[in-house]
């Protein structure tokens, strides 16, 4: 059915719709002003808008989480207990074996079974002590000490890894929160664009395809919010696990990190890794341990000693004459005769283990150097990207949106250009935040690779909870 409006009424209706569109469009332009990329909560609290790096960690939120992880993380506690156990094994390994106390009757006759008929019959009390060949005890204690040192470096490596994991999880969570904030704000702006398109379509100045496209974009952004919300729950659960908290703990609301100073030169980082990386230092202790094990295996060619002292008490003769008591002192040694079947394989095993430790150290050193090159490249590239987004890409993209809005008001650009311009700004804002997070994550990786995070957060045995 075709409805016919009077000409004057039709003109008034068209004028009202166009007025609505022109009123909504400046409001959209105000919402899309350059630099206004803060959430409504930030604006309400007076936080200055600007780059994603404007967030500050000066409050110590990340440091507080790292301290909590050092105190409560189960992996750190387990490594601490392992280190304690290894340290307690050092002293016993170098100690002498317990002496042997013996007593009994020596040279007693069977017929008659009496203790005073034979001169050699004695009631004997003796003590014996095993003594390893000189140098063996020190080598065994040195092996245990180097093993304890290696496990101590393993504990520091665990601390360093947990610090890295907590920092990376924190930055990932901050990035997903920032992305959700940007997506929610842009979803509101797309909703305003949709209302403008609907108003223009109502008065015959816009196409239905514009409305459908805006509705589709709005639905896609809603679906993306659902996906990001699911990802955030997974990331938050991982961070809670690293902190050693219960799953029912309070939610963590991280802030976007600052853009800090770049990493030092690569040669300085490599030297720091060789001097401070716990993993490399632990492998060096392992090499020293296997060298001591090789020296001990070669020492096994020398005999050990068994020193025995005994006192024999003799009874009087049957006619009452006293007999003198007697003492005995003997030294026994083992004869290392089975060299081919027992000792030679021990030496060969110790040599192979030492060669394995050297190869493991070289392989790990090369891997650390390669990862340092990679993370330095990521940090430098991310820093350059952040600078480029802040000084060029984002300002120009926001100006392009303003230009598209002005042109759209006078029908000089189509709806697709306006929508694409706004979605481009959203993509650049997310990429800018991702570059800031990637830069800080690369610094966390570099700190872990060079051992800086471990050297700055070593937990004394008395501070850890013993289980």
Image: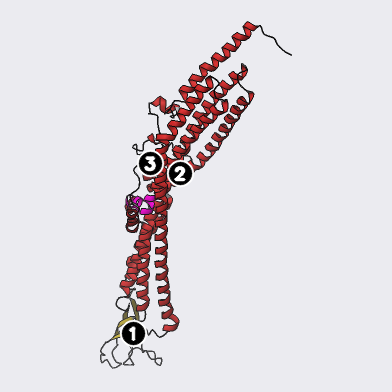
Lower sequence index among marks 3 and 1: 3
**For mark 3, what is the residue?**
62
Give the dominant element type of the magenta stretch: helix, strand or loop. Answer: helix
Callout in the foreground (1, 2) = 2
Q: Is residue 450 a member of the stretch shown in magenta?
A: yes
Q: Is residue 434 above or below residue 104?
A: above
What residue sits 31% from the left and 82% below the top?
Answer: 308
Q: Nearer the viewer, residue 314 or 263?
A: 263
Q: Is residue 56 above or below residue 316?
A: above
The image position of residue 248, as x and y in percent, is 48, 39
Query: Would you say 337 lies left or right of 210 here?
Result: left
- Secondary structure found at label 1: strand
Residue 67, visible in the rendered structure: yes
Residue that extends furthest to the front in the rendered view of this protein: 412
Label of residue 239 in the image: 2
Q: Is residue 435 a member of the stretch shown in magenta?
A: no
What residue sits 35% from the left and 79% below the top?
Answer: 102
Residue 244, visible in the rendered structure: no
Label of residue 253 in the image: none
- Secondary structure found at label 3: helix
Lower sequence index among marks 3 and 2: 3
What residue sits 62% from the left and 17% below the top?
Answer: 202
- The residue segment tinted magenta is 446-458
Label of residue 332 in the image: 1
Distance (Cα) linking label 3 and label 2:
12 Å
The image position of residue 244, as x and y in percent, is 43, 46
The image position of residue 433, as x and y in percent, is 44, 38
Q: Is residue 284 above or below residue 100?
A: above
What residue sits 58% from the left and 33% below the top?
Answer: 220
Lower sequence index among marks 1 and 2: 2
Badge 2 crowding class, 10 Å Cα cut-off, few under 14, some 14 to 19, many 20 or more, is many
């Amino acid at each position: 059915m075709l409805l016919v409006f009077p000409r004057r009424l039709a003109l008034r209706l068209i004028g009202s719709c166009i007025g609505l569109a022109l009123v909504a469009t400046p409001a959209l332009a105000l919402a899309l002003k350059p630099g206004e990329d803060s959430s409504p909560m930030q604006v309400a609290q007076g936080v200055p808008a600007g780059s994603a790096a404007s967030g500050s960690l000066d409050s110590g939120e990340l440091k507080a989480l790292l301290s909590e992880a050092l105190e409560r993380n189960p992996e750190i506690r387990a490594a601490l207990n392992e280190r304690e156990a290894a340290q307690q094994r050092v002293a016993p390994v170098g100690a002498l074996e317990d002496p042997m106390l013996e007593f009994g009757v020596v040279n007693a006759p069977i017929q008659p079974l009496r203790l005073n008929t034979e001169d050699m019959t004695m009631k004997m009390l003796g003590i014996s002590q095993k003594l390893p060949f000189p140098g063996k005890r020190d080598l065994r204690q040195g092996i245990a000490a180097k093993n304890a040192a290696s496990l101590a470096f393993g504990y520091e490596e665990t601390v360093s890894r947990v610090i890295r994991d907590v920092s990376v999880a924190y930055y990932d969570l901050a990035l997903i929160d920032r992305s959700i904030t940007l997506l929610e704000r842009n979803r509101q702006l797309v909703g305003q664009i949709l209302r403008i398109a609907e108003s223009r379509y109502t008065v015959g100045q816009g196409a239905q395809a514009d409305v459908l496209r805006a509705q589709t974009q709005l639905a896609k952004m809603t679906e993306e919010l659902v996906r990001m919300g699911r990802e955030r729950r997974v990331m938050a659960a991982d961070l809670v696990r690293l902190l050693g908290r219960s799953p029912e703990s309070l939610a963590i609301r991280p802030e976007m990190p600052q853009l800090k100073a770049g990493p030092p030169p690569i040669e300085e980082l490599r030297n720091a890794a060789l001097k401070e990386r716990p993993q490399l230092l632990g492998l060096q202790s392992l090499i020293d341990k296997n060298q001591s094990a090789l020296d001990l295996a070669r020492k096994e060619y020398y005999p050990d000693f068994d020193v025995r002292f005994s006192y024999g008490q003799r009874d009087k003769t049957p006619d009452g004459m006293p007999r003198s008591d007697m003492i005995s002192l003997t030294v026994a040694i083992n004869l290392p005769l089975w060299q081919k079947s027992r000792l030679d394989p021990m030496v060969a095993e110790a040599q192979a283990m030492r060669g394995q430790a050297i190869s493991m150290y070289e392989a790990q050193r090369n891997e650390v150097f390669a990862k340092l090159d990679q993370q330095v490249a990521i940090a430098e590239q991310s820093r350059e990207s952040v600078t480029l987004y802040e000084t060029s890409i984002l300002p120009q993209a926001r100006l392009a949106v303003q230009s598209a809005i002005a042109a759209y008001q006078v029908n000089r650009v189509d709806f697709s250009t306006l929508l694409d311009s706004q979605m481009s700004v959203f993509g650049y804002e997310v990429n800018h935040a991702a570059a800031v997070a990637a830069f800080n994550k690369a610094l966390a990786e570099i700190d872990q690779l060079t051992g800086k995070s471990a050297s700055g957060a070593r937990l004394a045995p008395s501070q850890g909870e013993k289980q």
